[in-house]
Amino acid sequence: MKKINADRIHTISGDILHEHVIVLDDSGQIKSIDPISEHDRASVEILKGDLIPGFVNAHCHLELSHMKGLVHTGTTLLPFLQSVVKYRDFPEDVIQEAIQKNDAYMYDQGIMAVGDISNKTDSFETKRNSPIRYYTFVEYFDLMQKSWTEKTWKQYQEVYELAPESIKDSRSNVPHAPYSMTPELFSMLKDSNSEGSTISIHNQETPEENQFLIDGSGAFRQFFEDFGFSLDDYKPIGKRSIHYALQFMRPDLKTIFVHNTTCTPNDLKAALAWNSQIYWATCPNANLYIENRLPNYRTFMEAGVKMCIGTDSLSSNWQLSVFEEIRTMQKYQSYVPFESILKWATINGAEALGFDDTLGTIEVGKSPGLVLLQLNAEGKVDQDSTCKRIV
Ligand SMILES: [Zn+2]
């Protein structure tokens, strides 16, 4: 048994508690939350700072961890994607070492669960043995090439069959992004997931993506041509990219839209009319790394939607830490209330992944992990703030 007290305990599900003790068993499950007066103070670990439940990283690509520092910053999305393709072929031992190191780093940074994209099987062994709870999104794309659809389907089905699935972990088949999916591949994916699955898709990361779906013009056309791909099969839909994806995805499954940097209130409205279980994952450091821009969080707050936070991969981030994403948000969009950001970083991601049975809030019966934050005098994360895993 462990008894822990801190200046403030952010339960996330309810009030901020003062003068309280969290009692946990050896597995980290919370047995009770009591006023400190009910315990002998000498038996309680008394901590200075703010205690929160462990973080949930709603969007990551652990298998790209060997790319740390390889890809230039500020290039915008299409040159970025070209670099990522270039650096995929690497010695297996380098890839494995980076995956293991960054799984351990995420745990150390207080992350309890990760929504993780896999195009390959590289990360599966590490994920299976990790203390982190993983949701593996096996990601499909055929780059608008009908002649690839069948082959793509088979290739990723093989990855899916090997993906971690246990009491701790989950998996599903997901589309990469509106601009990289034929209608045929979207349709094949549609019935491949069971009820209760979560789906993830990259969405509206750059203005060119919308342009490509509206009329087929712009930098994406050049991107496809540079790779030698024909766009003969491709028909623009006259609408922004999210509308293309909505036609082919299941409104009955929880869906995480990732990035959403160029999302408008009308895009949000259309998505909400389609599906009531949508989570909007923001990856601010990746957005700064690739495009030097951030989503306008006001748009999402005004629409009253559920946000969650992702780190994306080390091809587009300096580290895999939800705490560092919070630091960036507090620096550039400090109007977002800190208590809202804590929800985005914990319970919303846990719900999105279907892991809120054990994670996301400090409640009796859960095993959410505990993270101690040192905040500034205004109770916010600034350049001097720190985070430390306690449980
Ligand atoms: Zn991503």
Image (spheres, rainbow, N blue to C red):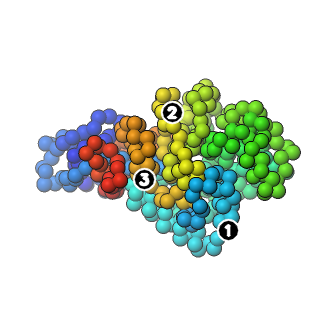
Instruction: Residue 69 in the image: state x and y as whole percent.
Output: 54, 65
Q: How many neighbours does mark 1 have within 10 angstroms: few (below 14), some (14-19), or many (20 or more)?
A: few
Instruction: Residue 61 in the image: state x and y as whole percent.
Output: 57, 56
Horizontal relation, residue 126 to residue 345: left or right: right
Residue 189, visible in the rendered structure = no
Where, quadrant-wise, is the C terminus in this rendering? bottom left
Identify the residue position indicated by label 3 in the image. 324
How many angstroms separate mark 1 from mark 3 (CA)? 29 Å
Horizontal relation, residue 382 to residue 17: left or right: right
Secondary structure at badge 1 equals loop
How many angstroms separate mark 1 from mark 2 (CA)? 38 Å
**Comparing labels 1 and 2, the label whose residue is closer to the camera:** 2
Residue at 13 percent of width and 51 percent of height: 41
How many angstroms separate mark 3 from mark 2 (CA)? 21 Å
Horizontal relation, residue 197 to residue 192: left or right: left
Q: How many neighbours does mark 3 have within 10 angstroms: few (below 14), some (14-19), or many (20 or more)?
A: many
* Tag 3 and tag 2, C-beta contact below 8 Å: no
In the displayed structure, 150 sits above or below 248; it is: below
Going by the numbered disc 1, the residue's amino acid type is: Asp
Q: How many neighbours does mark 2 have within 10 angstroms: few (below 14), some (14-19), or many (20 or more)?
A: some
Q: Residue 1 sits in which quadrant?
A: bottom left
Going by the numbered disc 3, the residue's amino acid type is: Glu
Q: Residue 207 sits in which quadrant?
A: top right
Residue at 59 percent of width and 36 percent of height: 263
Q: Earlier in the sequence, mark 1 or mark 2?
A: 1
Q: Earlier in the sequence, mark 3 or mark 2?
A: 2
* Tag 1 and tag 2, C-beta contact below 8 Å: no
Toward the viewer: 182 or 217? Answer: 217
Toward the viewer: 366 or 389? Answer: 389
Identify the residue position indicated by label 2 in the image. 300
Residue most extreme to the right? 232
Identify the residue position indicated by label 1 in the image. 89
